[in-house]
Image: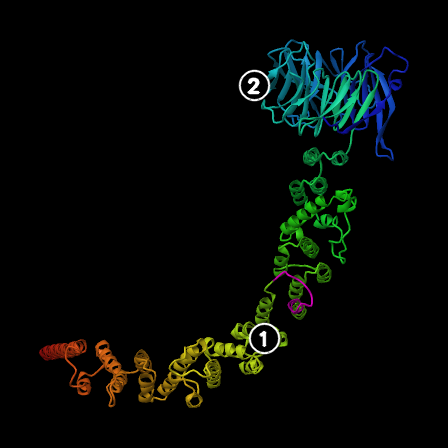
Amino acid sequence: MMSTKAFTLVPAVEREQLMGDREWVSLECVECCGRNLYVGTSDCFVYHFLLEEKTVPGGSATFTATKQLHRHLGFKKPVNELRAASALHRLLVLCDGCITLVHMLSLEPVPSGARIKGATAFALNENPVSGDPFCVEVCIISVKRRTIQVFLVYEDRVQIVREVSTPEQPLAVAVDGHFLCLALTTQYIILNYSTGVAQDLFPFCSEEKRPIVKRIGRQEFLLAGPGGLGMFATVAGISQRAPVHWSENVVGAAVCFPYVIALDSEFITVHSMLDQQQKQTLPFKEGHILQDFEGRLIVATSKGVYVLVPLPLEKQIQDLLASRRVEEALVLAKGARRNIPKEKFQVMYRRILQQAGFIQFAQLQFLEAKELFRSGQLDVRELISLYPFLLPTSSSFTRSHPPLHEFADLNQLTQGDQEKVAKCKRFLMSYLNEVRSTEVANGYKEDIDTALLKLYTEADHDSLLDLLVTENFCLLTDSAAWLEKHKKYFALGLLYHYNHQDAAAVQLWVSIVNGDIHDSTRSDLYEYIVDFLTYSLDADLVWQYADWVLQKDPEVGVQVFTKRPVDEQQSRFNPDDIISCLKKYPQALVKYLEHLVMDRRLQKEGYHTHLAVLYLDEVLQQRPSASGKDAEVTETQAKLRRLLQQSDLYQVHFLLDRIRGAGLPMESAILLGKLEQHEEALRILVHELADFPAAEGYCLWRSEGRAPPYRRRLFQLLLAIYLGPGPSAPELAMAAVDLLNRRATEFDAAQVLQLLPGTWSVQLLCPFLTGAVRDSVHARRTTQVAMGLAKSENLIYKYDKGVQKTKASVHSSLLCLDF
């Protein structure tokens, strides 16, 4: 058990002030009401003292008792009990079985001589039920066996209001409202004297120990239970608190929240009501009185009176924290809530939580520390300030006074242990990351984010970049110097960008790519710069670094123009200006023109012609000596052909002149097709290239979107070329047969039969002839159906007209009859 200093024992009335040299006289009872202290002695005297409390410079309390008066009561028996009724200015004195009313200041009995006879003990009802402010309710244990009597006591008279029988002889009593808590011979009970209903509590043996019955609050009592337990009981007969374990020989008890104080013949012990642990032991021999007088605890021996002065709860809590007893301090602090004004308690409790958090932090109990910091609403700068150089140089923060902890900085706390330092830094990273988006960060966001940036930088943590690319409040000056010190140039560029200094950011990144400074954060930094410039709104910055990105890699660099959002290109990024810039970079120029023509679909002749010329130049460079028939088709040549086919905006004659004699028959055929010179184009495809599928595809391409007769004319022309005059090659004849048999619907059968050589058999053209006949029959039948439908529609129309005429005639006849 670890001790807590909760109370100090201070003398109040010394023996000499009471008895002088009368050794045989002993102190029997005590009463305190405000500054008035009354003492009853064994020789039937009552003493009145004025008790003055003073606080010495060290903070401890002293008491001075000034004797006012003493008076003999006229009996030969000891004074058994004293109770003050301050509302009546009366003192109730029990002596020789009689309760006498005396004046509180003069100690003179009331003139009327009013008294209560036949009492062995009594208690005042501190929760009276009468409602009369000019009387007090007194409950006595009567000399009559098993009887309790209830009186109303006025200034000069007494009145009995109730007499209640008990199951056994009562030995001690406490009262609250209509409820009596009684210690009987063998048990404790709760008795409602209004209804007579009794509730047994627990057994008690009066032969073994002295009973204790104390009212400690509204409808709650403290009792000396079996086995050395201090038991709590409510008027409902239940216990809402755990019992405390005290001495078997306790003779007195009291409550000074959150403590239960117990007295035996040798010690005063202090027990917590919050965790039921014994907190303090004070040696005190021959003590026999312990009473609580409105929060003032008085103990007495037979020779002197002492005051148990509680240490302020804050002092107790600070002592516990100084001893690293965090849990006990927090339990005590929570328990103090009921005795401290709400606002004051909240301020005090938050500070205690913060102090406890630093104690746990110093012991590397980070989870516990974090919870305490958050519950205590710690100004996070208190924690950051432990770490050297993390707070910004511009921060005006000063630590709390008095301080929340005893450490100058992290090095002192960890005593230079680098492993502990690293753990503390990891904790701070985690904690700051959690609180930066909560209310805890309000007002301190710059300090938090700047500290977090410094921690991430030191640890080479991946979260550094995440911090800089999202909303943050890192102070530029401090953060930039820290990043530069640790050679985090890419991150420094991100910081510049976040602070709207894009030019500084790009310049820094370009220096990394050029090798002027070293930072391996991103291996794709060049591509990152291109992407950054692509989406930059600063046109001057883009033009400034356009040459640099194009020199590094034209095909990638041109993306600053090709991937830029279209709505940003209208004013500062005119296509003609960009084309002028790209003239030094042919590959980039091709990519950009492709972007204009294919992606943006700009309908401008110059762009289409320029792109076609660039394709053509590249094709010619790639195959300077290859013949038109044997050359393989390159990717660029395929692009050229696709452009020539799909675009209608380029200058056909200009390109045709460039292609002539260049060994590009397919391209020539496409251009001739654009000029509607189909026969020449088809002759190139058939005779020069012998590319029969291409010739067939040409017919489909040129007739796309045209009327069927136009397509038939093209296929008829192709067939005529296959079967034309001159030496007839077998492959041309086979191509003609194949064309007819596969595309019979594209031909006029009558015209085809006129072209066919007489030597061809019907079997050779069977598919074509079958298809032609089928088409002819289908056409005839379709025509017949259409004519039939037209005739039916005409008959229906005539019938409807006849019906309408008949109805009109009948209607006219009826009108005539009416007249």
Residue 27 magenta-highlighted: no
The amino acid type found where label 1 is placed reads: Leu
* In the displayed structure image, the side of residue 619 where residue 9 appears, left or right: right
| The furthest residue to the right | 21
Measured from the top left, where is residue 611 in percent x and y?
A: 48, 82
Residue 707: image quadrant is bottom left
Q: Residue 142 versus residue 287: which sits nearer the camera?
A: 287
According to the image, what is the colour scheme of the structure?
rainbow
Measured from the top left, where is residue 39 in percent x and y?
A: 81, 19
Q: CA distance from mark 2 to mark 1?
A: 102 Å
Q: Residue 308 versus residue 368: which sits nearer the camera?
A: 368
Which portion, as a residue range, is magenta? 509-522
Q: How many marks?
A: 2
Asked which secondary structure carries label 2, the reply is loop
Residue 153: image quadrant is top right
Q: Is residue 783 above or below residue 395?
A: below
Q: Is residue 92 visible?
A: no
Viewer-nearest of discs 2 and 1: 1
Please name the residue shown 62% across and 55% down the image: 462
Measured from the top left, where is residue 736 in percent x and y?
A: 24, 81
What residue is shown with label 1?
550
Q: Is residue 20 visible?
A: yes
**Where is the C terminus found, in terms of image quarters?**
bottom left
* In the displayed structure image, the side of residue 556 where residue 280 appears, left or right: right
What residue is shown with label 2?
197
Q: Residue 384 versus residue 207: which sits nearer the camera?
A: 384
Residue 516 magenta-highlighted: yes
**Where is the N terminus found, in terms of image quarters?**
top right
Residue 527: image quadrant is bottom right
Dot 2 surroundings within 10 Å: few (below 14), some, or many (20 or more)?
Answer: few
